[in-house]
Image: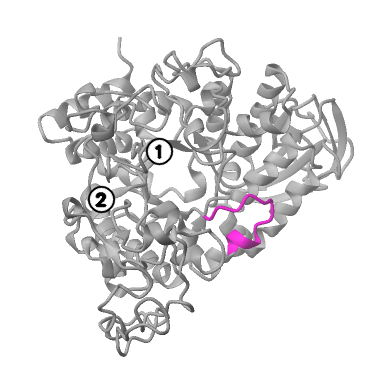
Amino acid sequence: MKSILGLIAASLLSSCAHAQTRPVATDRLESLRARAPSEEVIYFVLPDRFANGDTSNDRGGLTGDRLTTGFDPEAKGFYHGGDLRGLTEKLPYLKSMGITAIWFAPIFKNKPVQGLPGQESAGYHGYWITDFTRPDPHFGTREEFKAFVDAAHAMGMKVYMDIITNHTADVIGYAEGDAANYVYRSRGDYPYSTRGGPDGDRINEGFGGDVDSSPENFARLTDPRYAYTPVVPEAEKNVKVPSWLNDPIYYHNRGNSTFTGEDSRFGDFAGLDDLFTENPRVRSGMIEIYGQWIDDFGVDGFRIDTARHVDPGFWQAFVPAMEARARARGIPNFVMFGEVYKDIPQPGYIAEYTRRDKLPQVLDFAFQAAMRELLGRDAGTALLAQTFDGDVLYEGGAPAAVNLPTFLGNHDMGRFSTLIKADRPEISQDELLSRVLLAHAMMMTLRGAPVIYSGDEQGFVGDGGDQLAREDMFPSRTAVYNDNRLIGTQATTADANFDQNHPIYRLIAQMASIRADSDALRRGSQSVLHYEQEPGAFVASRVDEASGEQVLLAFNTAEHDVSVNVAVDYDIRGFTELAGACPAQVTAPGSAQFTLPAFGWAVCKVGDRAE
């Protein structure tokens, strides 16, 4: 017999087949949309690697070999067949794990294949967009996307789209590119006012540079040949949608970025066409593109790719425009979090983007880096305390930091298990599992909205980052994935990996259930109560001011048992055990003893208090 959740997903998919979907109950949507960002448990997934619900779209409607269709399930850098229908069919699996929001890699139509001869790969990941207005045919149709959103909403799950405003697919070439090796050409060496350097012919008379984003100023930027001469292949002159994206004037055209200094913002990200986001036409165009997805589908948020490579003025216009569009659609808590990649355990750099650029949230790379230091490199738990001390640096301070999406690894840097194994090459499978379980217990209960990367809950352990960290959840035909040793299971990636009895899946489900019942864990403030200079105990308190609920969290990052006396409120008398072993009562007013096994944890709700 099908589960109720399965029947909901199947019903909505059936409706999709008839080009219509059933509306989601208004009260359910209102309840879902009332939740704050901190209350979510987020699942991040690459649709191509999750579930293949429709084999007829594997080649995206194209014919030919893999260099035309992009489809080759035996190659890690090509499409494998996952799609929107498969993702919709597997929603009950996510719901049972306690997932409340789904963030998926970009689904927009991509350039199927790009790269130099012999170095080609496909746009399975979604970051090489040519058409911003519809899903890639490899994934499905607009109707199937609507069915997915409606099915997720019907199960109480939000939908976060992964969006890109920094670049498009690599379509524009440069006449001088091969000779110059596409090296970045700076604004000083190649000003907008001349062709090919300061001594070149004068162009763009009256243009005052990119610091003035007024329409009047950019009306004077008419010639894009200041640094390189843009060249668009005849077959791709009209490949981008909306059509304004086909004009090279709307791109920086300065060569490849090295991700430092000026070129970090103005250079082409790995050769991708870098949008001139200072231009008001680009700003209004992107606002209309993504506002339309809100209007048409009622999505609940955006993860913003490559946010640090876009000028602050763009975000200062884009963010309030999206928030207004969402409010008009009845979405009061529309979520936006930017990717600001910085793999150090100090939050100062990423916090800048919430203050200067006005991004509502950023992915918490500082937390990720701290967790790796703690569990991979034997840093003392004081390091995590120092990371949390930096919460005051975000716009809105510590209360705002509660909303940051926290994560352990991802599709770019690699999985947390992979990173820990890289740090500790001789680690046993059992110890690796123990460290990964502890990391998830910490992420699921400490401040922030935890993000589970698809496959982590099934013990995936990749060989590295990028393509090596993007294994299939459905039975894989990719040899470089199928020889991996997973943790917590005897399965390999050659098997379907949707095991709800996997120990990591069970832990996430348990912690998600505890979060769902706890105001303190979903939205409470956090105070660090105990830390050490070596691996060992870390204790924090979460408090929800509205309900008065308080939960103490205790973790042990050491390879041996620990017992610590922790200073607590003097009126606390006892605890209710939510997970792990909690002390039944305090040792004395103001002190409670926590005893934890190696890589253990305890989640303890404050119970009795003195009158």
* 342 part of magenta stretch: yes
The quadrant where residue 93 appears: top left
Chain-order first, disc 2 or disc 1: 1
> How would you rate the neighbour count of disc 1 (Cα within 10 Å): few for under 14, some for 14-19, many for 20 or more?
few
Q: Which mark is residue 489?
A: none
The correct choice, above or below, for 513 with respect to 30 in the image is above
Residue type for callout 1: Gln
Question: Magenta stretch: residue 158 in it?
Answer: no
Q: Name the residue located 39 percent from the left edge and 35 percent from the top edge.
A: 46
Task: Work out whether residue 209 can be spotted.
Answer: yes
Labels 2, 1: front one: 1
User: Mark 2 highlights which residue?
Assistant: 130
User: Where 421 falls versus 398 (above or below)?
Assistant: above
Q: Nearer the viewer, residue 61 or 184?
A: 184
Crowd tier of the residue under label 2, counting other residues whose Cα lies within 10 Å: few below 14, some 14–19, many 20 or above:
many
Q: CA distance from mark 2 to mark 1?
A: 20 Å
Q: Residue at x 48, y 67 (%)?
A: 358
In this view, the residue in front, 223 or 514, is 223
- The reply to whether residue 360 is in sight is no
Q: Which residues are magenta?
A: 340-351
